Image (spheres, rainbow, N blue to C red):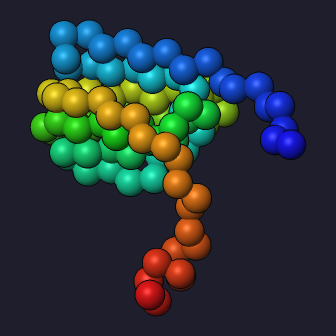
Amino acid sequence: MGENTAKSPNLITLDNRSRLVVTGVNDVDSFDEKSIVAYTDYGQLNIQGEELNIKKLSTESGELEVEGAVSALIYTQNRPRENIFKRMFR
């Protein structure tokens, strides 16, 4: 049987496609000016756009704030995170 764990609330607010606030973020795996990969209890969130800049990231409160031209928000299933050494030596 699976464990019954409470999920953190996940709220997304996008203002004029230029300021994004996401709550319920557990971690950010990677980021650059065109893509940010964040993990939530509801799946992996891929943020795509241009000139993306992380203005705030707090894993304690679960808040992520991004500025830039947001073009897409895509949820996928969380994949098990591999050790960095496993990825390097495949």
Q: How many marks?
A: 0
Among the 4 quarters of the image, the one containing residue 72 = top left
Q: Whole-percent x and y of residue 74?
A: 32, 34
Q: Whole-percent x and y of residue 45?
A: 41, 37
Q: Whole-percent x and y of residue 70?
A: 20, 27
Is 34 situated above or below 21? below
Residue at figure coordinates x 56%, y 68% from the top left: 82
Q: Is 11 displayed left or right of 54 in the figure?
A: right
Question: Can see residue 58?
Answer: no
User: Which residue is at the front of the view, 41 or 64?
Assistant: 41
Is 31 situated above or below 16? below
Residue lying at the far bottom of the rendered structure:
89
Question: Can see residue 19?
Answer: yes
Residue at figure coordinates x 23%, y 38% from the top left: 48
Residue at figure coordinates x 40%, y 35% from the top left: 75
Q: Whole-percent x and y of residue 85?
A: 53, 82
User: Which residue is at the front of the view, 5 or 38?
Assistant: 5
Q: Where the C terminus falls, by quadrant?
A: bottom left
Q: Where the N terminus falls, by quadrant?
A: top right
Q: Is 79 displayed left or right of 69 in the figure?
A: right
Q: Is 30 displayed left or right of 1 in the figure?
A: left
Residue lying at the far front of the rendered structure:
1
Is 54 situated above or below 37? above
